[in-house]
Amino acid sequence: MDTADFTAVLSEVRRFVRERVVPLEAEIDEKDEMPAGIREAAKKMGLFGFALPEEYGGLGLSMYEEAQLMFELGYTTPALRSMFGTNNGIAGHVLMVGGTEEQKAEWLPRIASGDVLASFALTEPDAGSDPSTLTTRAHRDGGDWVINGAKRYITNAPLADVFMTFARTDKDAPRTRGISTFLVPAGTPGLTVAPKDHKMGQFGAWTADVHFDDVRVPASAMIGGEAGLNQGFRTAMGCLAHGRVHISALCVGMAERLVDESVEYARTRVQSGKPIGAFQLVQGLIADSMTDYYAGRATVLEAARKFDTGEDTKIGPSCTKYFTSEMVSRVADRAVQVHGGAGYMRGVPVERFFRDSRLFRIYEGTSQIQQVIIAKALLGEVARG
């Protein structure tokens, strides 16, 4: 996308977020639902396919451009980004990374338009931070594959039209080499979605358990066709690396909003006859948060630039995800502190963002997993024992 077009996209998204979504945040949080009008507006703007190739109907943004877009989207409730983030991120990228040309042509245009909502079915009750231990299995039966197992915390599962499902296809292979990925449409006999989860935060973004009981799919449903056999773990890791930069930028956008909320409150809240922004200890909280935000933004842009060139698709994504997810939690905590008792009250934006921000240190790989990835990449065999 050329510079002028991208600038126009950013401007349109900024107006959409700040003029249409921000005023609805409290309603979204209270009702745990994204208004239909917001969903339709996002579809019209191409937000369900901003990271997907133009040849399949997406906007074809680079990682560097995507990061800047996420800064804007992160300024409001993360439920907005969650609505279309999986289409662009870990689910859509399954097809981009491992799909056959036929699979891409069939599914990507509908995913990019938002006509199809995709879910990434990897996490399980006993396989979260280490997906290589997943136990969902698929066995060949004639010309079909039959899938059995359960997935947990699957984003958009109650609304999904298709599930990118990871299952073990070779029980005797090393843990990371016996996994394949399948396209499983919603409504396939044996596939059931549990009631949506009741979470601490990020209301309006739905997750749920998904169960596979003798779910039968044709051989053509395997991502990559026969060449995709036992390539699922590699596919998942490639998708998650992209997702880590994506989530990092979202954290930066939220940090910016939290700084703005803190500054505005410190300017207007009067204590002892003057605005609390006149007190140096309050100034220190705000200065620390602005510094965190500034560092996080720079870190994301550098990681995105190196991701695009292929210079660093492992350490950089983990470093920036680790730093920014921890950073936004610190900024959220300070924002509540600046607001004092008001910051602990439902209906105040910083209270909601305090709850929302906590999840970023967990999904797309916990902070501890990022530490392990970074250390092993730097130390090699020493770190592996």
Image: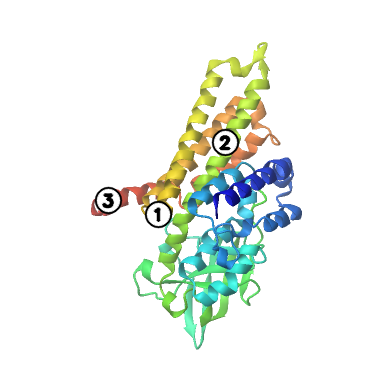
Percent of width and height locating residue 334: 55, 29
Residue at x 56% of width, y 80% of height: 216
Residue 162: % across, % down = 60, 69
Q: Which residue is mark 2?
A: 256
Q: Label 2: few (<14), some or many (≥20) within 10 Å?
A: many
Q: Amino acid at mark 2?
A: Glu
Q: Quadrant of residue 160?
A: bottom right
Amino acid at pointer 1: Thr
**Please, what secondary structure does the residue beneath circle 3 have?**
helix
Q: Earlier in the sequence, mark 3 or mark 2?
A: 2
* CB atoms of marks 2 and 1 within 8 Å: no
Query: What amino acid does circle 3 point to?
Result: Ala
The crowd level at tag 3 (other Cα within 10 Å; few <14, some 14-19, many 20+) is few
Answer yes or no: do the residues labelled 1 and 3 have beta carbons within 8 Å?
no
User: Which residue bears the numbered disc 3?
Assistant: 383
Can you tell which quarter of the image residue 42 is in?
Answer: bottom right
Q: Is residue 375 above or below residue 102?
A: above
Residue 205 position within the rendered picture, expressed as x and y whole percent measured from the top left: 64, 52
- In the image, taking residue 34 as reference, residue 10 lies left or right, namely left
* Label 1 SS: helix
In primary-sequence order, the first of circles 1 and 3 is 1
For marks 3 and 2, give the CA distance.
36 Å
Q: Which residue is mark 1?
A: 309
Is residue 86 depicted above or below 286 in this figure? below
